[in-house]
Image (tube, grey):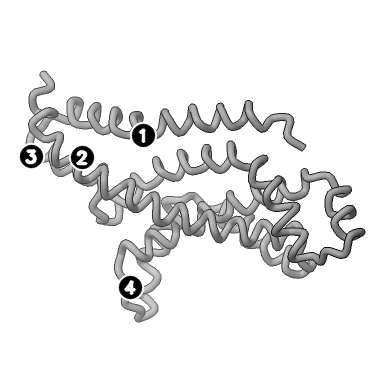
Amino acid sequence: MFDVLISNLPYLLKGALRTFWMAAVFVTAGSIVGVLFGSLAAMGPRWVGALITVYVFVIRGIPILVLMFIAYYAPPALGIRMPDIVAVGGALALYTGSYVTEITRGSILSVPKGQSDAARSIGMRGPAILRRIILPQAMRLSLPSLVNNSVIMIKATAYVSLVGIWELTYAAREVVERTLAPLEIFSGVMLIYFAVCYPLSLLSRHLERKYAYVH
């Protein structure tokens, strides 16, 4: 029954490599943006925090698929030439960044205020306090949520196939059109995603238990 899957597995794995490459690049970019914005939202000026809050609520209020369609169609409509993968990947990075912003902001605010007060009492300034005292503790607290968010975003990369970006799901659709075996092919796709995402989910749970009582 699954001979067709085995014979097409190399092609699917090639698509999987493209998927996980995209996820690594754009989720990492979004996470960097999120850590920066989350730090500014928690410890920066109020007007900066207000702008970041608007960004978070707007992006999180739009389905990721709609955001990708906007990113895909907006540049040509404005006369801007941009590779499709950059436009859609940028939407994925923005979406990731909005969630990482909130994760980082919450983690920073969960660090006891006495930590920063003690640092100021020995002459440390704001940027040094954030870099050397607050962020190391906040990142440990946020690691489980960051890993879990990465799992969600890896699976969200499947949406890029709907705008013509070749990756695992797009490759699977090509194979299905050729073989007329959707059950076998998409069962294989499911197993490929599971093989990557399940270990990350276990890592998230392990980190959650490990750092549950870190203060």
Give whichever of discs 1 and 4 has the lower sequence position. Answer: 4
Residue 214: name its quadrant.
Answer: top right
Label 1 belongs to which residue?
Answer: 196
Q: Choose between 172 and 18: the one closer to the eye.
A: 18
Q: Mark 3 falls on what kind of element? A: helix
| Residue type pointed to by label 3 | Arg
| Residue type pointed to by label 4 | Met
Identified at 44% across, 59% down, the residue is 91
Give whichever of discs 2 and 3 has the lower sequence position. Answer: 2
Give whichever of discs 3 and 1 has the lower sequence position. Answer: 3
| Residue type pointed to by label 2 | Leu
Label 3 belongs to which residue?
Answer: 178
Q: Choose between 209 and 1: the one closer to the eye.
A: 209
Give the distance between the C-alpha atoms of the residues marked 2 and 3, in whole angstroms.
Answer: 17 Å
Label 4 belongs to which residue?
Answer: 82
Q: Mark 2 falls on what kind of element? A: helix
Image check: 215 left or right of 57? right
Label 2 belongs to which residue?
Answer: 13
Image check: 48 left or right of 26? right
Residue depth check, mark 4 versus mark 3: number of the one nearer the observer: 4
